[in-house]
Image (cartoon, helix red, strand yellow):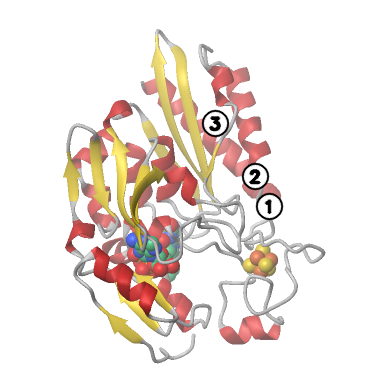
């Protein structure tokens, strides 16, 4: 790690002020809890001229409940989300995912917005400046070659946030605020399949609120991840599952994956299981479908084939567990 470089720090109290500062200050970036950003600054991965600290923006710190659902400010900490009674009751996967991020100290500072906007990760990228320099850097920053897929021009760094897949199975949307005003879009639409540039936000846009709709609240959901160190680690593979059943048959199944693609992936094609009775053969088919849509690459010390098998196994087990208890 390098020493902290010089940069200006702004601490606005209104969203519009934050957006204005971000857009009018060359080289400015947002920081929330700082648990990822500060590490990246000290590794020389990010070199901001200024940081716009969002932690004093009051609107971002609130959880509001109304007829539509639960609206979680982007600045709410993961600790708060994981302990919120309404999240625990109606959006269990989201509470479990927040509680699975890193360790307790990260959860005390890390925020929902920072987690949803987490940069993609790779073994060859999340390293110190001297380590990356000695490898001639890589395509994602300062280099010309991808060490994971040297022949290509794509970056396969994996999105490894825990909260996004859990929010995706709950049909979440987000409010974005930027220089052109405020808009609400499905959470899935903020992500792109590009490890180098994985967020589809407009320049200077920030996430203000995560919306979890009431329409499907309270149905069983859960989240689990595999990681090297159980006490504090990014997912090597993570899956969130949500089910709706009636008369012992599946009405709808949603599964979303993290850490196995450059974006959190909502598994496609699961509607074919609507009306199915979930026996072992169907569960095997679900696991295979999950495995085929997970595209882990050599971006962690753990082999891709293992992560692909693990993601199928987690999704299969969670689906079985949820449908048995529903
Ligand atoms: C040792 C270690 C282990 C970790 N393990 C995990 C893990 O298991 N799972 C996991 O998901 N993460 C993990 N992290 C990463 C990080 O701690 C969490 O993702 C955390 O939730 C990030 O939130 P933050 O508020 O600290 O974000 P910050 O570090 O402040 O910001 C992260 C990124 O989001 C942007 N950003 C922040 N808020 C907004 C907003 N409202 N709108 C738009 N952009 C925004 C920032 O500009 C930055 O690019 C780990 C980090 C460390 C150091
Ligand atoms: S996938 Fe390739 S380009 Fe992307 S961070 Fe890793 S080595 Fe760099």
- Asked whether, in this view, residue 278 is left or right of residue 151, the answer is left
Look at the numbered disc 2 and give the secondary structure of its residue. helix
Q: Which of these two is toward me, 9 or 137?
A: 9
Residue under numbered circle 3: 316
Location of residue 242 by image quarter: top left
Tell me which numbered mark, 1 or 3, is placed earlier along the sequence: 1
Residue under numbered circle 1: 304
Using a 10 Å C-alpha cutoff, classify the residue at mark 2 as few (fewer than 14 neighbours), some (14 to 19) or many (20 or more).
many
| 174 is higher (above) or lower (below) than 75 | above
Residue under numbered circle 2: 308
Look at the numbered disc 3 and give the secondary structure of its residue. helix
Give residue 146's position: percent from left, percent from top: 73, 68
Label 1 with label 3: CB-CB less than 8 Å? no
Report the residue that reaches farthest toward the top.
247
Distance Cα–Cα, label 3 vs label 2? 12 Å
Q: Which of these two is toward me, 273 or 226?
A: 273
Distance Cα–Cα, label 2 vs label 1? 6 Å
Check the picture and name the quadrant holding the C terminus: top left
Give residue 160's position: percent from left, percent from top: 51, 56
Q: Quadrant of ligand 2?
A: bottom right
Tell me which numbered mark, 3 or 2, is placed earlier along the sequence: 2
Label 2 with label 1: CB-CB less than 8 Å? yes
């Amino acid at each position: 790690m390098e020493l902290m470089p010089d940069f200006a720090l702004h601490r606005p109290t209104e969203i519009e002020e934050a957006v204005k500062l971000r857009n009018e200050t060359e080289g400015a970036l947002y920081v929330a809890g700082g648990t990822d950003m500060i590490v990246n600054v000290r590794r020389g991965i990010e070199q901001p001229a200024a940081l716009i600290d969002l932690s004093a923006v009051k609107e971002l710190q609130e959880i509001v409940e109304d007829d539509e659902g639960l609206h979680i400010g982007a600045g709410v900490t993961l600790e708060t989300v994981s302990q919120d009674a309404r999240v625990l009751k109606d959006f269990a996967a989201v509470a479990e995912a927040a509680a699975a991020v890193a360790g307790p100290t990260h959860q005390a500072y890390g925020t929902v917005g920072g987690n949803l906007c987490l940069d993609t990760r790779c073994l060859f990228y999340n390293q110190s400046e001297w380590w990356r320099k000695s490898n001639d850097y890589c395509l994602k920053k300062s280099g010309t070659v991808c060490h994971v897929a040297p022949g290509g021009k794509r970056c396969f760094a994996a999105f490894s946030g825990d909260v996004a897949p859990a929010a995706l199975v709950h049909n979440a949307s987000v409010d974005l605020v930027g220089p052109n005003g405020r808009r609400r879009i499905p959470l899935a639409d903020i992500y792109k399949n590009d490890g180098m540039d994985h967020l589809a936000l407009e320049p200077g846009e920030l996430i203000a609120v995560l919306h979890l709709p009431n329409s499907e609240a309270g149905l069983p959901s859960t989240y689990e991840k595999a990681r090297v160190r159980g006490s504090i680690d990014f997912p090597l593979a993570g899956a969130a599952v949500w089910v709706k059943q009636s008369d012992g048959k599946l009405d709808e199944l949603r599964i979303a994956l993290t850490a196995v693609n450059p974006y959190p992936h909502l598994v496609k094609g699961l509607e074919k299981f609507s009306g199915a009775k979930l026996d072992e053969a169907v569960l095997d088919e679900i696991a295979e479908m999950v495995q085929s849509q997970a595209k882990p690459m050599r971006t962690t010390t753990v082999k891709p084939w293992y992560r692909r098998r693990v993601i199928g196994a987690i999704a299969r087990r969670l689906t079985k567990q949820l449908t048995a208890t529903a």
